[in-house]
Image (tube, helix red, strand yellow):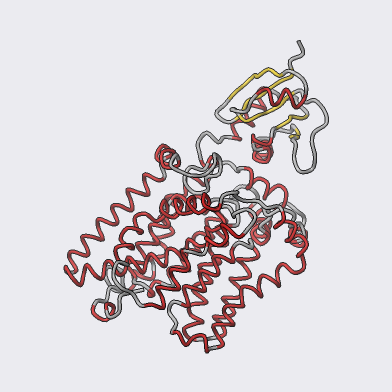
Amino acid sequence: MMRKGLERKVSFRSFIISGKAEKFAWLFLFVLLCLRAKQLLLRPLWFDEALTVLNFALLESPAKIYHSYVIPNNQILHTIFLHWWIKVFSFDFLRLFPLLCGFCTLAFLWQLRRKSSNMASFYVLAVLAMSFPFALYATALRGYMLSAAAVAGGVWMVTRYLEIGKWRHLAGWFIFSLLGVGTMPGTLAGLAGAMLFGMGYCRWNMFRQRRIYLAGVAPLVAFMIFYLPIKDNLLRCAALGEGWQSGTSMLLALAMGVVFTFLPALIPAAMGHLRAHRLTPALFHLAIWLLPVPAAYLFKAAPFPRVFFPLFPVFALLLANGVRDFLAILRHKRGARYAFSALQVMCGCAVLWSGLCHREPFRQRAGALHPFPSGQDDFIDCHFAKRSFSPRFTAQKFKEYFPDAAVVYVTFESDPWALMYAFMENGVNTRIIFDGPAGKYSGVPAVAITHFNEDKRALETRFQCRYTSVFTSDNHTFWVVDNE
């Protein structure tokens, strides 16, 4: 998306990063990711993560996991990889798998650096690697980072295939498409973005060539191959209608997540796009930004904003184009020294923004601006990334207060699956019961756990008896039946 003729006047590719250093830039990006992700690696599992591990990853075989697609929480290929990971490494290093997927995402994107420039690509990928949302999903036991890696690898392959038409690149595009859709159906949006990105570098006569249609149909074929054997399960999951009731709120939340992730790159990229650009890439690349809009309004419920996280790698490539133009224009008009000074300022802003975003008080203030319901934040102030989210502490205290309790009732709002996993980690043998899809508990529990801000009257109405609190933390409250 460079202004016509600009690339012939100004070459920014060898500016600062060149030669041997270029080969190791991806390693430095991974170091940046590890530095930002280290605090999130040891956080406790929350509802979706614990449900994925306990209900699906621990099934006896990959075939059983594949045919147990009963809720979208079973992101099938990701769950199968977790299944194998647990067999090899036990439960001690679970979060290293998504971190590995994050590394692959950055490495795949680095392969496309010459679509913009070495320095612009490195800068934007460094902003992405240091961002809080990327570190969050690079340590999450969910399939979003695996899908992002599939999209990043896919955009690399499909761009090469559309350029030179070699079958090995088409095969790579198909394999990455299969990996993405096999993790979650929503990856189709990210794959569509990858396809549009590659089309932006083709001429308009591409529609006369067979390769454009083969590339376009590959993700759909991959989707059908993977889900046809379990199509009834897929339709039942789609009928659940999980998501947001307001498509507009979803789009606003997604936009805030993009800004929160890429702000140090968004500003210079926007300045780089102020000039006229070639029509072909401009149209196709603009369409990438608009991909979430149809999904927000066509479905019964708008998808969760995090479903579009696999689009973030493609957004990074688009922003790298804008940063390339911005730096090239500065160098052309003011000279290399001025451009280098601007780059230094940009890097300082990126480090400052990353440091702020990884501070919980700042995220709380930023999250207070959100247009979405409490507890539905996917990118900024997620409740499961806060220090107050402490199911392990709850498990330790429960073991201290009720060492002989056989069962405990846990409300759905207090995250029963996270507590199950925390109880398992801390050797608490008490069985957790709760009202879930399998049905309601029929007895009257002597001990109950609720979220700390739940109304006591709801618990007493549920079991028609009185309860007395014995302990309250930042997360949970323990209750016992009041026999008086």
Position of residue 476 measured from the top left corner of the image (x, y, whole percent) = 61, 29
Which residue is painted at 72% across and 67% down in the image? 227
| Foreground pick, 174 / 208 | 208
Q: Is residue 87 visible?
A: no
Give the residue displayed 39% in from the left and 56% down from the top.
262
| Residue 329 sits in quarter | bottom left
Residue 478: name its quadrant.
top right
Does residue 119 appear left or right of residue 133 in this picture?
A: left
Q: Residue at image x 60%, y 66%? A: 180
Residue at the spot 68% in from the left edge and 46% down from the top edge: 51
Furthest residue in direction right, as rendered: 442
Identify the image quadrant of the N terminus. Answer: bottom left
User: Outermost residue, top direction?
Assistant: 484
Using the image as rendered, state which of residue 460 and residue 408 is in the foreground. Answer: 460
Quarter of the view holding residue 363? top left
* Position of residue 222 measured from the top left corner of the image (x, y, whole percent): 66, 73
Give percent across and percent down for residue 392.
Answer: 60, 35
Position of residue 168 relative to residue 317, above or below, is: below
Q: Is residue 272 left or right of residue 250?
A: left
- As drawn, 268 above or below 217: above
The mark total stands at: 0
Residue 316 in the image: state x and y as whole percent. Answer: 42, 63
Q: Is residue 286 visible?
A: yes
Q: From the viewer's side, name the closer residue of 468 and 302.
A: 302
